[in-house]
Image (spheres, rainbow, N blue to C red):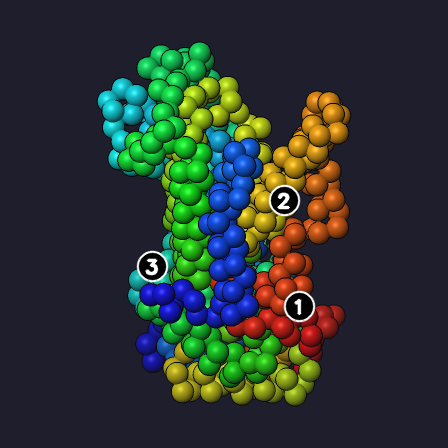
Amino acid sequence: MAVLLEVRGLSKSFRGLRAVQQVAFEVPEGSITGLIGPNGAGKTTVFNLVAGVMRPDAGEVRLGGTRIDGWRPDQVCAAGVGRTFQIVKPFAGLTVRENVTVGALRKSNDVSSAQRRADEILEKLRLGPKRGMLASSLTLPDRKRLEVARALATRPRLLLLDEVMAGLRPTETDQIVAFFRELNRAEGVTILLIEHVMRAVMALAQQVVVLHHGEVIARGEPAAVVRDPAVLECYLGEETEV
Amino acid sequence: MIARLLEGVPRRGLVLLGLLLAALVVFPFFASGYLLTVGFLVLYFAYVGQSWNIMMGFAGQLSLGHSLYVGLGAYAAAALYVHFGVSPWIGLSASIAFSGLAGAVIGFLAFRFGVAGVYFAILTIAFAEFARIGFDHFAWVQGSSGFFLPVANYATNDLWNLRGSPTMFYYLMLAMSAAAFVLCHALVRSRMGYYWQAIRESPEAAEALGINVFRYKMAAVVISAAMTSLAGVVFAFYYNNLFPEQIFHISRSIELILGPIIGGIGTLVGPLVGALLLTGLAEGMREIMLQLKVDVPGVKQVFYGLCLLLVVMFLPHGVWPPLARRLGLERGGADGAARADEGKP
Ligand SMILES: Nc1ncnc2c1ncn2[C@@H]1O[C@H](COP(=O)(O)OP(=O)(O)OP(=O)(O)O)[C@@H](O)[C@H]1O
Ligand SMILES: [Mg+2]
């Protein structure tokens, strides 16, 4: 399988705090890859470096072979990367449908076709009945789904999901897991997901990258990685949802 | 085109708009000379409020220096007319160019170097102040002693040179306000309108969705500045005198943003409602005071203050949104979809 996202020697410090150190991994085209690790491991920072929110201190990010580190977020999006925010950032004063339409406009010729695309996505994510509501009136799990809907509307090749299942009930988790699997299978969207809900990671990911203190401590198949002594060590004392 | 514009607009809203327009059209037939000038002011403030609202209401960029664009627009067209006899209809292209350029410079400096929020607002004030001081010493337009246009002959209406009666100016301002209303309606539902609102709500999320935030903020400033400058052209030819100390003054910038704030920031009808309330009632108050022979200076200012206070306290989103709900009209946004189920699970 061709490599869609390649990260090499990626490092970022915040005033001396080394949040991400020499991180390297690959996301094969068409795969679902999990990025896990305890709180503060640097997972979200990796996303921000890939998505162009921050510039890495060192290292490179390649998308389909092209270097994208240092690009602006809108340029990274235009290159085919959609991302959600762990701390959700809905367009609070706009309706759910308007939120998603903004994303859909990127690949639509006009507003009405963007609205149609938004409706389709909302339907699939079970937000259809809420499309007329203001985003500010959504519950947190719904806001997370809205994040996904908005990112998907830009028709990304690579979707970066940052803890979108936090706070979902088990049945809801199963639903969204099924949704992502179908999205990956039918539309060929490559997914890199940060997730604490191990049940979801085990169900979805073909490959897992484990971060700890900003460093990659393990990579491989999910079943093997969760038995890795180093991984067990770093999660010791951590509350993990299995 | 027309069908596209009307899409999703509630019928009741159209009827009310039609009635309002009709009332404004016939107003001069019934209004006295004084009332006509009040009507002109209402439309003037509705127009500049609408223009300011593009920046603040749609794109979320607070400008406290819009007097800059009024002033540049006024001086450009007036100077071309007085010095070269150029019709204001041609001169307005210079007004648009200068104001648009000024907006672009301010926007570039601010948005390139991450000046945002109140700091951006202060930058807009600073530029208006630069202009005020600069024009005080600008001899070509008589500096601080004031620039005068030859006073109009009210016997004939010369629309080409904007020399004529208050009625002519009233209708001109009405046409401009109506055009601005339709333009803003179209803008807010366009791709750009969606992008502006996204930037207003969350610039980070907007960027992540592929929006070039810098470009669209620039567009908002330049369009708003250009539209505002046209009000300056009318101002110059209506009052026939321009003083930098007045036209560029910060109190003018504040005055023109009160309408949309009172009416409802980010709404289409808000600027008109606010202008109507503030100008109409303030002038009405003055009239009543005159009749009652109460001679208290500053009544208008006190009234403005009171209005602002009441609205801020009881109607934090302005007068129009709750009024629209009362009238059975949905909140005016980019999307025609019903918001009736707003807030319900
Ligand atoms: N913008 C920032 N400024 C300063 N420090 C930051 C910033 N962003 C992250 N950090 C720090 O970098 C470290 C890694 O944070 P990051 O958010 O990447 O962790 P994470 O793995 O996503 O954790 P979580 O599971 O809690 O979301 C933390 O110590 C955090 O406090
Ligand atoms: Mg995180």
Say which quarter of the image contains residue A126. bottom right
The span from disc 3 to disc 1 (Cα, nearest Å) is 39 Å
**Amino acid at pointer 2:** Leu
Read off the chain for label 1.
A
Query: Residue beneath label 1, please?
Result: A137
| Circle 2 residues within 10 Å: few <14, some 14–19, many ≥20 | some
Q: At 39% from the left edge and 28% from the top edge, which residue is drawn?
A: B154
Q: Where residue A201 sits: x, y (%)? A: 57, 80
Q: Which residue is mark 2?
A: B277
Q: Is residue A218 left or right of residue A183?
A: right
Q: Could you give the CA–CA distance between mark 1 and mark 2, rounded to whole angstroms?
A: 32 Å
The residue type indicated by label 3 comes to Arg
Q: Nearer the viewer, mark 3 or mark 1?
A: 1
Query: Would you place residue A35 above or below residue B58 in this image?
Result: below
- In the rendered structure, which disc, 3 or 1, sits on the residue that comes first in sequence? 3
Amino acid type for the residue under numbered disc 1: Ser
Q: Is residue A114 above or below residue A52?
A: below
Q: Residue at x 65, y 58 (%)?
A: B323
